[in-house]
Structures are given as structure tokens and as C-alpha cells.
């Protein structure tokens, strides 16, 4: 039987989290690692989401690694193709390709208590690793609702994250289901070319203008010649968002002024009072993610667009029936219905020390120590784990904080030496989660009067971080060994036990000889 390949670290996923982890491992001197990627290229969500109009709602200079600044961002808010190109560039600059295994989807990860490692089964072969870094991300597996009759729909059906570029929407009757971040970018992009666009809206979003523009050649030249100018730009963007956090987390009532600005933004484009009423949310702004678009409302005001202020409930052939009983004909259905965020599929594939899957351990709700370590899953860390999401800033900031934690985790294992593993203590995980949930109580995400994808099936917010990015960075700057249980391989324990017994025997033998010597001396003296 061929010996299973073994590596020190296995990273799962090659989006921002996975590539960031790979770079950080190399900078810490760790080169014995692999990055397992189920697709045939890097990019994560920025590879998978290629729908028309796909772009980031965080400014470009803040939505990039601090250790890999890009002076040549073409726009203040970058499009999908530019962000994906940036990740390809990071992969090449930091020479990560030799470590990446494409078309290697993780099918199972099982903790091996005897060897203190993870046995990993992938679609391209099996291996084992001392440490696993799960960087699959919460926006990687699309969620499509179970609509009665959908299987019998004669037209084209696809999710926004699996866009069918071979299907021509021109002249078609298209139904867009959902009004989240993807939908508000898709709607204005396809509206001019489709015959009719029907938008099924369960809950209207709050939408603010997207102040986007081309970054001039002069600006880019300045950033290249004087990198400090790009750093200052990034710092300013970060600082503004840090100041906004208090309103989201402690004083939601202060967001009323922002609501008025959002309503004025809507009124500029939507002149029809009836349509405006349908588009006006009945919850506090910020409860769901505030969306940015300057084209969404103008597109909805066009004569070939119908807004159905109700969710899609049934499909009868090519007829789509809304929950309010209204009907619409369609040749294609595009679902912009989000992702499996609080029930990530990867959790079903991770089997911990007690033989339970991560999904089973998280049945009552996701929770992880400092957003990284789950109790009962030794030497397993997640990037963008429970309660690490943000409602108003760049996730790259949170990822880099978790990379600091990963780096110290690896250092601690080095210091401990031998075959060692660290398992988060249940008491430490619960204590951390209690503090997070206590702070969550007064946030706009919990008090704003909406149901969002931030909440799990029981209504608990297991997604968002209830503080500033600075606070999270301080909380993850180092690993506190008191929060972990140290595990040793059985063989190593036996060896240490034997050594201890041997030393004890030697000590007793020495004491015995010393006693005999004293007795002999006593006899001679007598």
C-alpha cells in the first residue's frame, strides 16, 4: 500500500483567504503546504461571480492586501475582472502556483487522533496534514430556493454565481428573483437588452449612490512613484469606516439621517408614488447590508421593467406565480438568492475528534474561538469564520487579522515541539461567543427589524463582528494557550511516560545506593 502523502499545512480554497494564508505561511518560513482548490483557477468568489455588472462595493484601495498594494486600480470601485486579475497577480508575485492543486475538491477531512493529523480525501487524491486552514468562504456555495414546479420550467434557469454566458438574454423575458447585492448590479446591466424584466422582491433594500469614477493616470503614477500616497488613501478610507461603526453597533437610532439621504436618492429616479412605496424598506437602514448603486433605481423606472413586491412561490410551465397571486411569463429565471452562509457545506465534510461533523457540532449555531477555532477540531482553523463578517468595511482587514492569528498558532506549535496539537477548550469558545452575542444585542443587525442572511435558522447573528476592525485585530494578535488543550500523540506520551519512569527508577536506585553507603559508613564509624 502506497504511503499517504503528508504536508505540514493544507489550505482549502484559493480566494482572498486561501491566498492570504499561503503568503503568510511562506513569510513565516513554512513551505511544506498545499492549497486545495476545487476549480481550475484561483479567485474564489471573484472567479465564480462573473455576472454582468459584477463589482465590489468596497473602495479598491481598501479591498486589497496591505502587503500587496496595487497602485494601478482603474476605478475607485473595482469590477470583478480587475479583482480577479489582482488575485492572479498575487499568486504569481508570491510564487504560490507550485503549492496549488487545482481540481482538488475536498470530499472529507477526518481527525486522526493516533497520528495527530488530518486525513484528507480530495477528488484528485488523498493526503494528510498537521494543520488545516479552511478558507472556503461564506459566499462560495449558491443557495437556490425550493420552488414548486421549478423543475418543469421550459426555459433557462441559473444562479447569479453560476452565470451562463452561453445563453443570450437579448430579446428574452427574464425574471430576476431576489434584490440583494448581486441583483442590484445585474438589473441595470441587462435591462437595456431584454424584452421584459420582472423583478421578484421579497424585501426592498436600502440603496445609496455608488460614487464611482475612473482613477486618473496622474493618481496612479503618483501611487507608483510614492507608495506612501496609496497608503494614506487606504488609511483614510479605513478611518472613515471605523468611525461609522458606533452607529451600527451601539447607536442605531443615529442612522435615521442616512435613511433620509437614501429616500432622497430613490425619489430622484422613482417618480411613481406607488413604485416608490414598494421600494421603501420598513426596517432600519443597516439591518441588511446597505447596497450601493447609481443605476438600480433608474433601471426600475424603465417601461420594460415590472417590480413584483412579493417572492416567487410557484412555477407553472413558463408562468411564474408570486406569493401575492400575481403572474408573469418568462423565458429565463435568474436567482440572486444568496449563499449558504450559516450552513456552509464544508461543515458536513469535516469530522472532528469525537467523530462528529462540524455541521453537527454547529447544529445549535456556528461558534468559534476568535472566529477561528472550533472545540473538538484540533489544529483546524477557519478564515472568515463565525462572527467575522462586516457590515460596512473591507473583509480583507478581517482576513489579515486572522492571518496574524494563524501565524502565531504555527509559532506556538513550533515552540511546543514534537507531535502536538491545540484544541480550543469548549469553555473558551463559549465564553468568547457569549461576549460576542452580548455585544450583538444592541446592534442594528439585531434591533433593526429585518430578517437577513446574517441570522441563522434560530434567529441568532452568527455572521457579523459587533465591533471595529481595530478591536478584532487586537483580539487576534496572538494565541492564548490557556484557551486551548494541548494534545500529544499516544506514542510520544508513552515515550515521555517511559522516560519519566526510567528517571524515577534511577532516582530511587540512587537513593537506595546512597542509603546503603550511609549504612556502611555508619557501621565503619561504629
Image (cartoon, grey):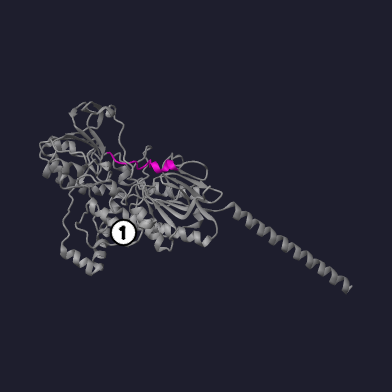
Looking at the rendering, which quadrant does residue 188 occupy?
top left
Region rendered in magenta: 337-349
Neighbor class of circle 1 (other Cα within 10 Å; few <14, some 14-19, many 20+) is many
Q: Nearer the viewer, residue 106 or 381?
A: 106
As drawn, which residue projects farthest toward the right? 526
Any part of residue 250 in sight: no
User: Where is residue 444 shown, x and y percent of the image?
Assistant: 30, 46
Q: Is residue 197 magenta?
A: no
For the stretch drawn in magenta, the main secondary structure is loop
Question: Seen in the image, is 497 located left or right of residue 3?
Answer: right
Q: Is residue 341 magenta?
A: yes
What residue appears at the point 53 percent right and 60 percent down from the top-left corner?
416
Residue occupied by mark 1: 90
User: Where is residue 40 shown, x and y percent of the image?
Assistant: 33, 49
User: Where is residue 197 shown, x and y percent of the image?
Assistant: 16, 36
What residue appears at the point 24 percent right and 32 percent down from the top-left corner?
311
User: Where is residue 290 shown, x and y percent of the image?
Assistant: 24, 46
Amino acid at each position: 500500500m502506497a504511503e499517504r502523502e503528508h504536508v505540514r499545512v493544507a489550505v482549502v480554497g484559493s480566494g482572498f483567504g486561501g491566498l492570504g494564508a499561503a503568503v503568510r505561511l511562506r513569510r513565516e518560513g513554512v513551505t511544506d503546504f498545499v492549497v486545495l482548490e476545487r476549480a481550475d483557477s484561483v479567485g474564489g468568489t471573484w472567479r465564480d461571480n462573473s455576472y454582468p455588472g459584477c463589482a465590489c462595493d468596497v473602495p479598491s484601495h481598501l479591498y486589497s492586501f496591505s502587503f500587496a498594494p496595487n497602485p494601478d486600480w482603474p476605478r475607485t470601485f473595482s469590477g470583478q475582472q480587475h479583482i480577479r486579475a489582482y488575485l492572479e497577480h498575487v499568486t504569481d508575485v508570491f510564487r504560490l502556483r507550485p503549492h496549488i492543486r487545482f481540481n482538488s475538491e475536498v470530499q472529507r477531512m477526518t481527525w486522526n487522533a493516533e497520528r495527530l493529523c488530518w486525513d484528507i480525501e480530495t477528488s484528485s487524491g488523498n493526503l494528510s496534514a498537521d494543520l488545516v486552514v479552511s478558507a472556503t468562504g461564506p459566499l462560495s456555495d449558491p443557495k437556490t430556493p425550493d420552488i414548486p414546479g421549478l423543475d418543469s420550467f421550459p426555459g433557462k434557469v441559473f444562479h447569479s454565481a453560476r452565470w451562463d454566458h452561453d445563453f443570450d438574454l437579448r430579446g428574452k423575458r427574464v425574471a430576476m428573483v431576489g434584490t440583494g447585492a448581486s441583483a442590484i448590479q445585474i438589473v441595470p446591466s441587462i435591462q437595456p437588452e431584454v424584452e421584459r424584466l420582472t423583478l421578484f422582491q421579497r424585501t426592498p433594500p436600502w440603496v445609496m449612490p455608488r460614487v464611482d469614477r475612473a482613477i486618473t493616470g496622474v493618481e496612479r503614477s503618483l501611487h507608483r512613484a510614492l507608495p506612501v500616497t496609496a497608503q494614506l488613501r487606504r488609511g483614510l478610507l479605513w478611518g472613515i469606516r471605523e468611525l461609522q461603526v458606533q452607529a451600527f453597533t451601539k447607536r442605531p437610532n443615529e442612522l435615521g439621517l442616512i435613511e433620509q439621504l437614501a429616500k432622497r436618492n430613490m425619489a430622484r429616479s422613482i417618480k411613481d408614488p406607488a413604485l416608490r412605496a414598494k421600494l421603501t424598506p420598513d426596517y432600519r437602514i443597516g439591518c441588511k447590508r446597505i447596497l450601493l448603486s447609481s443605476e438600480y433605481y433608474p433601471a426600475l423606472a424603465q417601461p420594460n421593467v415590472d417590480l413584483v413586491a412579493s417572492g416567487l412561490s410557484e412555477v407553472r410551465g413558463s408562468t411564474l406565480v408570486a406569493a401575492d397571486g400575481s403572474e408573469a411569463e418568462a423565458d429565463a429565471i435568474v436567482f440572486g438568492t444568496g449563499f449558504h452562509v450559516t450552513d456552509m457545506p464544508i461543515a458536513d465534510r469535516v469530522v472532528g475528534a469525537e467523530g462528529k461533523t462540524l455541521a453537527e457540532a454547529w447544529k445549535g449555531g456556528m461558534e468559534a474561538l476568535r472566529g477561528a477555532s472550533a472545540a473538538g477540531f484540533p489544529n483546524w482553523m477557519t478564515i472568515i469564520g463565525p462572527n467575522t463578517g462586516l457590515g460596512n468595511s473591507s473583509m480583507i482587514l478581517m482576513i489579515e487579522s486572522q492571518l496574524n492569528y494563524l501565524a502565531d498558532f504555527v509559532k506556538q506549535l513550533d515552540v511546543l515541539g514534537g507531535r502536538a496539537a491545540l484544541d480550543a477548550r469548549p469553555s473558551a469558545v463559549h465564553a468568547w461567543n457569549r461576549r460576542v452575542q452580548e455585544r450583538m444585542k444592541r446592534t442594528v443587525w439585531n434591533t433593526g427589524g429585518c430578517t437577513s442572511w446574517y441570522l441563522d435558522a434560530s434567529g441568532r447573528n452568527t455572521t457579523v463582528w459587533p465591533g471595529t476592525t481595530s478591536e478584532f485585530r487586537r483580539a487576534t494578535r496572538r494565541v492564548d494557550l490557556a484557551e486551548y488543550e494541548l494534545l500529544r500523540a499516544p506514542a510520544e506520551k508513552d515515550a515521555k511516560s517511559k522516560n519519566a519512569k526510567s528517571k524515577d527508577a534511577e532516582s530511587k536506585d540512587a537513593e537506595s545506593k546512597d542509603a546503603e553507603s550511609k549504612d556502611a559508613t555508619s557501621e565503619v564509624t561504629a
